[in-house]
Image (cartoon, coloured by chain):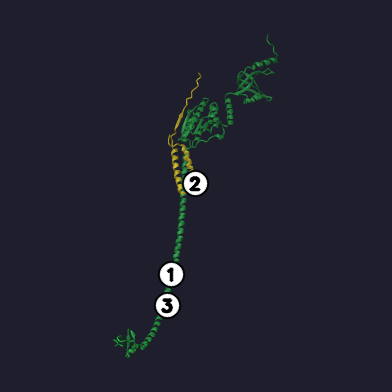
């Protein structure tokens, strides 16, 4: 199983959305803004690399369904 | 000897006998009518024969069947004779629909039952995850739905893993297999984030499993959210009503469980652009503030500097005025000095004249003139002797004459 699980994708997205709305407010100072901006770019890059994954993995489960045979 | 019956005895006796023979007859309903609101008459027929049927209106209601001519039905009851007319008929206890009608009726009954129990309630339906890690797919690999779903999942969101539980979805045989699929996923509830139960469209017979009570209950009690889509039919199956999300087709089911990667990538780019824009805005705001402060600082400095320059100017003016005063003063002093000197000189001259006059007076009165006439001064120890009594023999005397002094001693 890859170390990066797509389950974290939702967290990454949430974080990106949070940063976007935080920066939208006028009252953070410039240093903070720049830090968040950098983090935002990091997140965007990570998300993009994951989403560009093109291999689909399909695993098959087949149960044997026995026919009832009347004795 | 044969028993001789009266008609009523006969009818009564035959009714008793016939009552012992329960019977089921299937045929086409015909001549349906209700007499006096209570008495229901109809015939069951086939190509060769027809059988009169009779029941009471409330008994018909109890069956829940809408009886009409042409309907294929199965009747349960027993043969009998009408008391008055002796007419042969079947007294109907129960009616069942057969064929398509039966399936339809079963469907409606089960729907009502499940709805009443709350299996369709919106409130219990769970949301599906925005970014599923693993998708469970319950369908047959023979079904067109299978390839459709996989294709759409791959296009939209290939990074999700798919676990395909192979199950028939056609006819009665599908029922235990679909139920087994849900049992499997319930036993491994962490194996998938969402389940898709799907097949293409079909007749009521084809879709039986999706209208089956066991399957519906399995969908309801699934620990993992279920998206169910049965394709193309206008009528909804019960499994779709029970599922957390009802999709209109298999493809739609695949769309509902996944985000569109392409759209997401666009959204991320838009976010990135928005962030850059915001940062630019902040930076330009801050640089405006800085510039503003610098200007203010400059202004403040300039004011101070101007004040100082002004003060220096005033000082310069004042000090040159002062210099003027000084020069003037010096002139006056010099002038006064000169005047003073002149006066002093005048005074001095006057005093000199006075002094010379006194001096000459003094000179005339002084011993020198006397000495010049031949007189002398006798001094003892620097003092003039004016009497012989003041000297003693041996004293050293100095006699001053007009042209010198004589040292002598007393005898």
| Residue B369 pos. (x, y %) | 34, 89
Q: Nearer the viewer, mark 2 or mark 3?
A: 3
Q: Which residue is mark 2?
A: A24
Number of the label disc, if any, that sits on residue B320: 1
- Among all residues in the image, which is located at the extreme front? B393
Q: Which residue is mark 3?
A: B336
C-alpha span from label 1 to label 3: 24 Å
Q: Is residue B369 above or below residue B323?
A: below
Give neighbour class at mark 2: few <14, some 14-19, many 20+ (Cα, 10 Å). some
Q: Using the rendered image, report if marks 1 and 3 lie on a common chain.
A: yes
Frontmost residue, B255 versus B219: B219
- Name the quarter where the C terminus of chain B is drawn: bottom left
Label 2 chain ID: A
Q: Colour of chain B?
A: green
Circles 1 and 3: CB atoms closer than 8 Å: no
Q: Using the rendered image, report if marks 2 and 3 lie on a common chain.
A: no
Q: Is residue B327 above or below residue B27?
A: below
Q: Is residue A18 visible?
A: yes
Q: Which chain is yellow?
A: A
| Residue A45 pos. (x, y %) | 44, 41
Label 1 chain ID: B
Q: Quadrant of residue B66?
A: top right
- Among all residues in the image, which is located at the extreme bottom? B373
Q: What is the secondary structure assignment of the residue under circle 2? A: helix
C-alpha span from label 2 to label 3: 87 Å
Circles 1 and 2: CB atoms closer than 8 Å: no
Frontmost residue, A37 versus B183: B183
Q: What is the secondary structure assignment of the residue under circle 1? A: helix
Give neighbour class at mark 3: few <14, some 14-19, many 20+ (Cα, 10 Å). few
Q: What is the secondary structure assignment of the residue under circle 3? A: helix
């Amino acid at each position: 199983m890859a170390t990066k699980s797509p389950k974290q994708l939702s967290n990454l997205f949430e974080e990106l959305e949070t940063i976007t709305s935080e920066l939208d407010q006028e009252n953070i100072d410039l240093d903070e803004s720049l830090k968040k901006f950098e983090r935002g770019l990091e997140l965007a890059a990570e998300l993009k690399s994951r989403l560009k994954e093109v291999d689909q993995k399909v695993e098959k489960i087949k149960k044997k369904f026995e026919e009832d045979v009347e004795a | 000897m044969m028993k001789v019956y009266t008609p009523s005895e006969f009818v009564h006796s035959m009714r008793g006998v016939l009552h012992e023979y329960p019977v089921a007859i299937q045929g086409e309903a015909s001549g349906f009518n209700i007499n006096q609101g209570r008495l229901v008459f109809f015939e069951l027929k086939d190509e060769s024969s027809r059988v009169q049927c009779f029941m009471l209106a409330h008994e018909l209601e109890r069956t829940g069947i809408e009886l009409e001519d042409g309907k294929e039905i199965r009747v349960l009851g027993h043969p009998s004779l009408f008391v008055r007319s002796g007419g042969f008929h079947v007294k109907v206890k129960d009616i069942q629909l057969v064929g398509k009608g039966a399936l339809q009726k079963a469907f409606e009954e089960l729907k009502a039952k499940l709805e009443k129990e709350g299996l369709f309630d919106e409130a219990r339906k769970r949301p599906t995850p925005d970014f599923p890690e693993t998708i469970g797919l319950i369908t047959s690999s023979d079904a067109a739905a299978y390839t459709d779903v996989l294709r759409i999942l791959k296009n939209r969101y290939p990074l999700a893993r798919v676990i395909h539980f192979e199950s028939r979805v056609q006819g009665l045989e599908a029922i235990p297999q679909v139920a087994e699929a849900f049992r499997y996923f319930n036993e491994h509830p962490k194996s998938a984030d969402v389940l898709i139960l799907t097949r293409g469209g079909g007749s009521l017979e084809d879709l039986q499993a999706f209208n089956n009570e066991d399957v519906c209950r399995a969908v309801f009690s699934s620990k993992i959210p279920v998206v169910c889509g049965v394709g193309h039919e206008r009528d909804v199956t019960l499994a779709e009503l029970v599922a957390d999300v009802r999709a209109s087709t298999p493809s739609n089911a695949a769309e509902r469980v996944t985000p569109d990667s392409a759209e997401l990538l666009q959204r991320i780019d838009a976010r990135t652009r928005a962030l850059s824009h915001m940062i630019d805005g902040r930076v330009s705001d801050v640089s405006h503030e800085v510039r503003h402060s610098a200007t203010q600082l400059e202004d403040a400095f300039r004011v101070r500097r101007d004040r100082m320059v002004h003060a220096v100017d005033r000082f310069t003016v004042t000090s040159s005025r002062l210099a003027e005063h000084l020069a003037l003063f010096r002139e006056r002093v010099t002038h006064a000095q000169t005047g003073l000197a002149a006066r002093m000189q005048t005074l001095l001259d006057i005093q000199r004249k006075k002094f010379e006059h006194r001096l000459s007076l003094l000179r005339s009165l002084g011993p020198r003139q006397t000495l010049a006439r031949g007189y002398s001064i006798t001094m003892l120890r620097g003092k003039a002797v004016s009497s012989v009594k003041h000297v003693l023999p041996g004293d050293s005397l100095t006699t001053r004459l007009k042209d010198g002094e004589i040292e002598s001693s007393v005898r």
